[in-house]
């Protein structure tokens, strides 16, 4: 085992990792392929990396697959992503125990077809006996999520509203805050992803396109996290 790996396994692990999977289209373009080929490879890579995160025993991983803004893409591309989604949901319905993946689909699912909504509910139900949480953000936007949370609290006649109340009204309600966000594809922004939950997250950016990301890149991001001095607004001892 390399020295790098020793640090990874011996150090504090992030409890919740968020991943912005960017660069599928550019990955395909670089190879002279249609954008949809990039999404296909991106989805396969999602599967590989999700398994790696379970192997590392990360408690919660959230992957940004489709934002509230992604509907603006050409219909053919959106349809292609939807049909990929159906294929994977069908596969996950039959997921075996050894994968230990518990799915939650976060975002406004009312925009999806009845078939997709039924598949989502079924995958969540069937995987609920497993323990490593995988959130897949679909038609997700943090502003929408926060507006939904405030509406829920308003309906409860909740007053005054505390940050903890907001936390428990989010899609991620019973999960720890995000410790580490990884964004691939070269852009350095959060793009409406987990804005409330990532208040103290460490941010790791890489220029690599999502389909090129390997287990080692995820390990590098975790090492980056382990080498951070997390003060949560306080001071490090001795400073
Ligand atoms: C970002 O790349 C990717 C998306 C907006 C879609 C993500 C979709 C997948 C990973 C596949 C679907 C996943 C599942 C599990 C069904 P981009 O298209 O914005 O890339 P670009 O910035 O290079 O154009």
Image (spheres, rainbow, N blue to C red):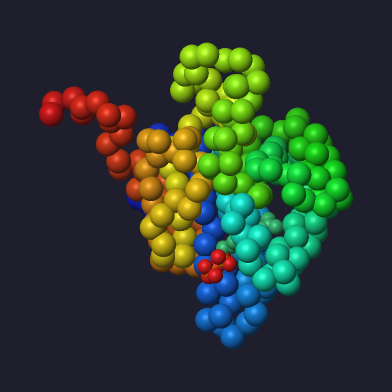
Residue situated furthest left in the rendering: 239
Residue situated furthest bottom in the rendering: 32
The residue sitting at 63% across, 82% down in the picture is 33
Quadrant assignment, res 228: top left
Q: Position of residue 142 (x, y in %)?
A: 54, 42
Q: Determine the quadrant in which ligand 1 lies.
A: bottom right
Quadrant assignment, res 153: top right
Quadrant assignment, res 61: top right
Left/right placement of residue 230 relative to residue 95 reads left
The residue sitting at 52% across, 81% down in the picture is 30
Is residue 54 or residue 158 the one in the foreground? Answer: 158
Is residue 149 or residue 170 the one in the foreground? Answer: 149
- Residue 174: tell me if it is visible: no
Left/right placement of residue 203 relative to residue 81 reads left
The residue sitting at 75% across, 30% down in the picture is 129
Q: Position of residue 18 (x, y in %)?
A: 51, 45
Left/right placement of residue 95 relative to residue 178 reads right
Is residue 228 or residue 165 the one in the foreground? Answer: 165
Q: Position of residue 234 (x, y in %)?
A: 24, 26
Left/right placement of residue 50 relative to residue 75 reads left
The residue sitting at 61% across, 33% down in the picture is 148
Q: Position of residue 79 (x, y in %)?
A: 75, 66
- Residue 166: tell me if it is visible: yes
Q: Quadrant of the C terminus?
A: top left
Q: Note whether 46 is above or below 173 in the view shown.
A: below
Total tally of numbered discs in the picture? 0
Q: Note whether 203 is above or below 82 in the view shown.
A: above
């Amino acid at each position: 085992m390399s020295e790098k790996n020793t640090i990874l396994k011996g150090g504090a692990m992030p409890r919740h990792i968020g991943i912005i999977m960017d660069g599928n289209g550019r990955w395909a373009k670089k190879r002279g392929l249609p954008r949809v080929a990039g999404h296909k490879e991106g989805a396969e890579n999602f599967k590989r990396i999700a398994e790696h995160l379970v192997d590392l025993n990360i408690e919660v991983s959230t992957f940004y697959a489709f934002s509230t803004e992604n509907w603006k893409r050409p219909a053919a591309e959106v349809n292609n992503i939807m049909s990929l989604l159906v294929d994977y949901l069908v596969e996950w319905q039959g997921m075996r125990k050894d994968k230990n993946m518990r799915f939650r689909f976060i975002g406004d699912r009312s925009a999806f077809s009845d078939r997709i909504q039924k598949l989502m509910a079924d995958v969540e139900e069937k995987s609920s006996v497993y323990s490593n949480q995988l959130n897949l953000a679909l038609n997700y936007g943090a502003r929408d999520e926060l507006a939904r949370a405030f509406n829920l609290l308003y309906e409860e006649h909740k007053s005054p509203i505390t940050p903890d109340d907001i936390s428990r009204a989010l899609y991620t309600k019973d999960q720890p805050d995000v410790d580490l966000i990884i964004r691939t594809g070269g852009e350095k922004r959060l793009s409406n992803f987990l804005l409330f939950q990532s208040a103290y997250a460490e941010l790791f950016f890489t220029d690599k396109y999502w389909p090129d990301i390997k287990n080692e890149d995820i390990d590098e991001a975790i090492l980056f996290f382990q080498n951070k001095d997390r003060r949560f607004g306080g001071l490090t001892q001795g400073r």
